[in-house]
Image: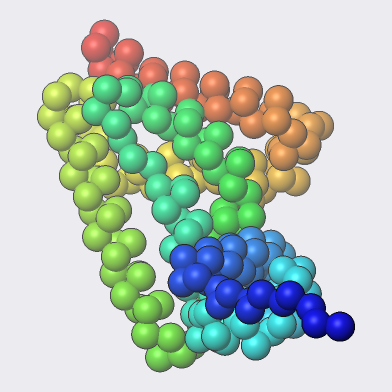
Amino acid sequence: MATDRRPRRAPQEEDRRRDSGRTRERIIGAAVGEFSAHGYSGARVTRIAKAAGVNAQLISYHFDGKAGLYQAVLERGTSALDPLPAADRSLSDIAGDYVRVTGRNADITRLLAWEGLGDTPEAGEHAAIEGHGQGRADFMHGIVAQLRARQADGEFPEDLDAGHLLLAVYAMASAPVLLPQVARQIFGADAGDDDFQEEFAQQVTRLVAHLATRHETG
């Protein structure tokens, strides 16, 4: 008996791009947790592929291997953490918000700690890694320039160095994630708890605000 079978349509280019994009997102999402927990050296592509529900070969196809995937995760994560001092917000409010952002992106914060300890791809393993480092340095220099402009406008005292202030804000924001045991020792609280994170963000806001208060009354 004859059947009326319509020819199957070839996937549209837009559909293929959408599927490819979803696959990349699943892989990156799985890789964030893996790199955060084990560092670059300890991370395993097979575990990332399993967590993402994909064939491990797709990591090579989409990211040119483990180093390329690490680079993609690093770019995504650091863009989420970058403190962008909005002109219409005070430095103290920005510092408090950065505590909140860091807490919401704890995996990325831990990944940056691994990076700081030197657990990164070997030099030359992936060309984009070196370029990313210079790009981050340029970004940070831009933030320091913005802070110096705020300092010239009188937002915080002249005897403070803008670069050191930026580093201090980074350190404060990262402390609950990178030193949770110290938070427990001081407060008997879980540093990852939302209530603790919000309380700490408010305290950092007040701390930075006092810089301006002392400057105005000094």
Single out the residue that lies furthest toward the top.
Answer: 217
Image location (x, y in percent) of residue 57: 65, 88
Single out the residue that lies furthest toward the bottom.
Answer: 124
Quadrant that contains the C terminus: top left
Between residue 217 and residue 55, name the one nearer to us: 55
Q: Residue at x 20, y 30 (%)?
A: 150
Q: Residue at x 26, y 8 (%)?
A: 217
Image location (x, y in percent) of residue 187: 75, 29
Image location (x, y in percent) of residue 23: 61, 69
Name above or below for residue 88 compared with residue 15.
above
Between residue 7 and residue 36, name the one nearer to us: 7
Between residue 114 and residue 55, name the one nearer to us: 55
Single out the residue that lies furthest toward the front.
Answer: 1
Name above or below for residue 26 compared with residue 176.
below
Q: Is residue 24 visible?
A: no
Quadrant that contains the N terminus: bottom right
Q: Is residue 155 left or right of residue 78?
A: left
Q: Residue at x 18, y 22 (%)?
A: 154
Image location (x, y in percent) of residue 115: 52, 69
Name above or below for residue 145 compared with residue 212.
below
Q: Is residue 175 left or right of residue 141?
A: right
Q: Is residue 162 left or right of residue 207?
A: left
The colour mode here is rainbow
Name above or below for residue 171 compared with residue 160.
below
Q: Is residue 131 visible?
A: yes
How many badges with numbers are in the image?
Answer: 0
Q: Residue at x 74, y 75 (%)?
A: 4
